[in-house]
Amino acid sequence: MAYKRQIDRLPIIPADAKKHNVTCHYCIVGCGYHAYTWPINKQGGTAPEENAFGVDLSEQQGAETEAWYAPSMYSIVKQDGKDVHLVIKPDQGCSVNSGLGSIRGARMAENRRSDVLGTQQQRLTEPMVWRYGTWQPTSWEDALDLVARVTARVIDDGDEDDLYVSMFDHGGSAGGYENTWGTGKLYFDSMKVKNCRIHNRPAYNSEVHSTRDMGIGELNYCYEDYQLTDTIFMVGANSLETQTNLFLNHMVPGVRGDTLAKKEAELPGELHAPARVVVVDPRRTVTVNAFEEVAGKENVLHLAINSGTDLALFNALFTHIADQGWVDAEFIAASTFQDGVAQPQDEQHPAALGSFEAARAACRMSLADAAAICGVSEADIAKAAEWIAMPKEGGARRRCVFPYEKGIIWGNDNYRTIGALVNLGLATGNIGRPGGGVVRLGGHQEGYMRPSDAHVGRPAPYLDRLIIGGGGKVHHIWANDHYKTTLNASEFKRVYNRRTNMVKEAMDARAGATREELVDAIVAAIEAGGLFSVNVDIVHTQIGQQAHVILPAVESGEMNLTSMNGERRMRLVEKYMDGPGSAKPDCLIAAGLAQALERVLREEGRDAYADRFKGYDWASEEDAFMDGYHANTGQIVTYDRLRAMGNNGVQEPVIGYEDGKLIGVKRLYADGKFDRHGREDKKALFCCGAWRGLQAPGKAAQKAGFRFLVNNGRSNINWQNWFLDKDNDFVADRYPYPFLEIHPDDMADLGLAAGDLVEVYNDVGATQAMAYPVETARRGETFMLFGAPSGTQGNVINAGTNELILPNYKQTWADIRKISDAPATVKHLSFKSKEYRMG
Ligand SMILES: Nc1nc2c(c(=O)[nH]1)N[C@H]1C(S)=C(S)[C@@H](COP(=O)(O)OP(=O)(O)OC[C@H]3O[C@@H](n4cnc5c(=O)[nH]c(N)nc54)[C@H](O)[C@@H]3O)O[C@H]1N2
Ligand SMILES: Nc1nc2c(c(=O)[nH]1)N[C@H]1C(S)=C(S)[C@@H](COP(=O)(O)OP(=O)(O)OC[C@H]3O[C@@H](n4cnc5c(=O)[nH]c(N)nc54)[C@H](O)[C@@H]3O)O[C@H]1N2
Ligand code: SF4
Ligand SMILES: [Mo]
């Protein structure tokens, strides 16, 4: 913030500044930006030929001008060892965001480490080893040698089950095709590690097994579909805050009617109107509020269902739509399985899968029964069914897009619930068609490229539970902080602290010993129940406090990085600055670790096993990309070709290269053939999953035993587990503690004033938050910001998951008591409503 830095003006970007393509590395949407850099001792001028915009800056610019940037878009960073000015500003030419930023992406620059401006000084610069009772910086060679020697002692060819791994599987920073390949090759090719988990759930599995088992990949549409549709049926997502520019640049124009001419042109012969919206969320969100403001209340239906009851709602909608005959019979006949049950329910399939009629029989649910379970009116459910599927005037099929995210992914009965939503899309012929799609909205960007994980099995091992039960000897952690973001976190931390402290104590006791003696001491502590922890991150995290070796990584922009967004749009972020100190791309850290393991194993005379760790002689992230993505996807995509595609990139799968352009695919399944399940007939399957109450162990009892629902999730301003936020004035000023949204009457009952610090506690743990009064909250239903270092919501989530180890973060109940009046850092905060009114 310029005012905070005590400067009253920012430099003009000179005409000859270097310009780099950048895709914002925070959320799934993947907005296009440009990074401009130029030498510290230069700046541009107001004359058109003196600035990057080519306009006369001595004249007042229009309101929508591109020729400006905000203080948060500016920094001074290192590039090739020299100080340079850096501006990262939104790209008007990118079809994803058309020049819009967000409160997160438009602060990319101020969140870079700057030694001149003093931002993000928390970034790790050197490897660190637990030594002499504290953290000591050291060289890569020393750190990797220790990791390799301890790891080599607990693994062997064909027996790698004592090595536990937690690793990202996404795109953007802390991910990307380069880095998922580097880690994937190490753990799934050189080794066959099966005791592993992903950053956001306690097993190595899919977030959305059922849609895939039904034949439908979860990112099947394009963002333009929101501009072509008749209805948006949004489930368990708060897109204004979590997919911001998808909401602002695609959903809002669609519902506001800005795109009517486009609809007429692209979809002639049917009646068009501005899109209507149904939002399924127990909580009234700012997304509901904003939809109402832009579309008019009469065009927005908020189904405020009881937490965890989506399955009953979807089954009733399916039943009603089928009974009315509002289904796409032709599509069902041509593209879906016809003959009863194709896949019976079993250990790997929490519901049977089969034909439309089989699902119709299994899922039957009346409007009245659903209304009672969900706590919404029959009339509203019937209205939602009409908005989804009642044929339009003139008889044309209604187009509906069904976006969903964590409200059901981390919700009750994941498999059946997502399956039931996909049923709606299939029955109404809304997959693979303009204005359709049953899609994940997404979290991070995607960027998955790994050797097969089939050896992990299904259901995959529940890693947290194994750790708590004393399993595992060495734990490698890549880019996540379970202390802030896992479930059953109270117990996890208790056990993890104890087991890793055993190893720390053993290391302390052998200070000054030789490497061999030290490794012996560590292994002895491990054999006594200890756990050796290796943490690869960009900052010193909470779980990192318990690590024995810490390895510093660089972020997107400090390396070249590829990933794809929620419409499968793949781009290259061009490196525009140096990483801090000796930090490296994750793929090269994985390569370094593989090489160290090869050397150690060879020294130990285990040559055959050592040979498995060959093939990592990558000099750069580009080499990792060529070895992974390029080699495994038809050898079409290269950095140069992607760079030439700019910020609009190419939509995957990439199927060709012609006239200097990569050729992609706009929508999946446009031919009505479904293959995500691998069935040869390419027919989609329906899900036969009846409602069965709160499915995960312990949830119903918790609900009965505690007074408040502790719904939880995200805020616009915070990014994930606050790893950058906690060192950023702007965010830390706003939310020094996680907020707990709560109704003012509930606050009165508990004797609370706004900002008071409260304890949230139940049968599995406790955490803290600051009370934030919200008039529209329902009595007895709170919403807590997740992932905070100053109060982890996961502490009160129980260990119960679905059959395939998908956590239910959202269904949690607890009691609340006051800890203290508002702390000093909270006293100045505003507790105004987060809703807005137009006009
Ligand atoms: N600003 C910001 N944006 C982000 C992120 C961030 O940290 N900050 N993180 C990114 C990531 S990794 C992810 S995964 C996405 C998540 O994106 P979202 O899924 O949109 O975000 P959440 O806040 O986790 O949850 C969405 C909604 O689920 C609702 N919900 C709770 N229980 C239920 C239920 O039983 N049924 C239904 N239907 N809804 C329920 C909550 O009230 C909440 O409004 O956001 C991405 N975008
Ligand atoms: N209660 C509750 N819990 C939840 C959720 C919820 O809705 N409610 N949502 C879940 C979801 S969807 C998610 S995605 C998870 C998020 O949980 P985490 O994955 O733990 O959170 P992130 O903030 O994404 O973690 C990123 C970590 O990687 C580091 N990092 C950033 N860039 C890089 C890089 O380039 N390389 C390396 N090596 N490290 C890097 C950061 O410092 C940070 O420690 O939380 C899950 N937990
Ligand atoms: S909407 Fe997402 S991708 Fe776009 S600028 Fe914001 S955080 Fe970045
Ligand atoms: Mo996520």
Image (tube, helix red, strand yellow):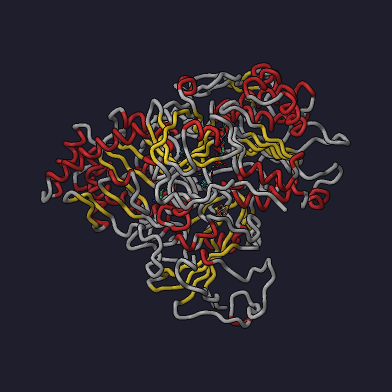
Q: Is residue 190 left or right of residue 381?
A: left
Percent of width and height locating residue 326 = 79, 27
Residue 838, above or below 282: below
View extreme (right): residue: 394
Residue 782, above or below 736: above
Residue 206, above or below 382: below
Q: Is residue 442 left or right of residue 390?
A: left
The residue lying toward the viewer, choosing from 837 and 18, is 837
Residue 755 seen in the figure = yes
The residue lying toward the viewer, choosing from 308 and 550, is 308
Residue 199 seen in the figure = no
Which image quarter: residue 330? top right
Task: Tell me which residue sits at (70%, 49%) in the image.
Answer: 252
Q: Is residue 29 left or right of residue 132?
A: right
Task: Tell me which residue sits at (44%, 66%) in the image.
Answer: 577
Task: Tell me which residue sits at (49%, 32%) in the image.
Answer: 710
Which image quarter: residue 113? bottom left
Percent of width and height locating residue 320 = 74, 23
